[in-house]
Image: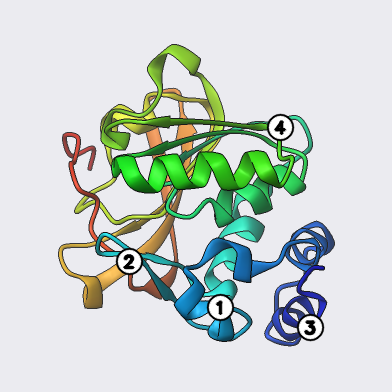
Amino acid sequence: MGDADLARELSRRGISDRRVLEAIASLDRSQFVPATERGNATSDQPLPIGHGQTISQPYIVGFMSQALDVQPGERILEIGTGSGYQAAVLAKMGADVYSVEIVPELAAQARERLQQLGLERINLKHGDGAHGWPEAAPFDAIVLTAAPKHVPQDLLAQVRVGGRLLAPVGEREELQQLVLVRRTADGGAVERLLSVRFVPLTRETPRLC
């Protein structure tokens, strides 16, 4: 049983990518949150998932998935698996997802959850996401679900030229901007999309710009 009503609400709020809406409608968000939060699963708000981490509000998941403009068969690296919800949405959109989670308990829970849901296009590992997944690079796109202070150079280097990196960036939660960086031969072109609030990236790579 998916969240068709949630998808309709996101459509009313401006999420227009049909594949994003279909992916969200096909998933049950209550399966990605602790039992104590399942009654709030279809509300458009972030929810705690333990270990100081949260599952993003559905609107932000939809907005980020739409901004990535994921095409079927693309290789997407996600930094910060959390409960696995964003990875599941991207996989439902046809991407081959590589996801890294630094909290071992969350990584183990997400792996079990995604396997139970039969989402075979997701490769998940426990590790320091600030270093990406270099042995699997290059990626068509990278998405961060935790905020570094600056656009991370080590991660941008793992994006193919012409690909994109989407990240909340900022010193403090209340000052973050969601930015889309399009990789160029000599760096990246940065577009600021939205003011957001994410938990900080646990470890960071050197500043790019």
The kind of residue on which mark 4 rests is Glu
The kind of residue on which mark 2 rests is Phe
Give the camera-side residue of 178 and 128: 128
Residue on which the image places disc 3: 5
Between the residue at mark 3 and the residue at mark 2, the CA separation in whole angstroms equals 25 Å
SS assignment at label 2: loop
Residue on which the image places disc 1: 38
Of the two numbered discs 2 and 4 in the rendering, the one whose residue sits closer to the viewer: 4
Decide: is 114 above or below 170: above
Residue on which the image places disc 4: 120
Counting residues from the start of the chain, the first of labels 4 and 3 encountered is 3
Q: Left or right of 138: which side holds 177? A: left
Counting residues from the start of the chain, the first of labels 1 and 4 encountered is 1
Estimate the x, y position of residue 97 in percent, counting from the top left.
60, 35
- Going 33% across and 73% down the picture, which residue do you hit? 197
Q: Left or right of 162: which side holds 94? A: right
SS assignment at label 1: helix
Q: Quick check: can you spot residue 79?
A: no
**The C terminus lies in which quarter of the figure?**
top left
Q: Residues within 10 Å of mark 3 (few under 14, many from 20)?
A: few
- Going 23% across and 78% down the picture, which residue do you hit? 174
Residue on which the image places disc 2: 198
Counting residues from the start of the chain, the first of labels 3 and 1 encountered is 3
Estimate the x, y position of residue 192 in percent, counting from the top left.
42, 63
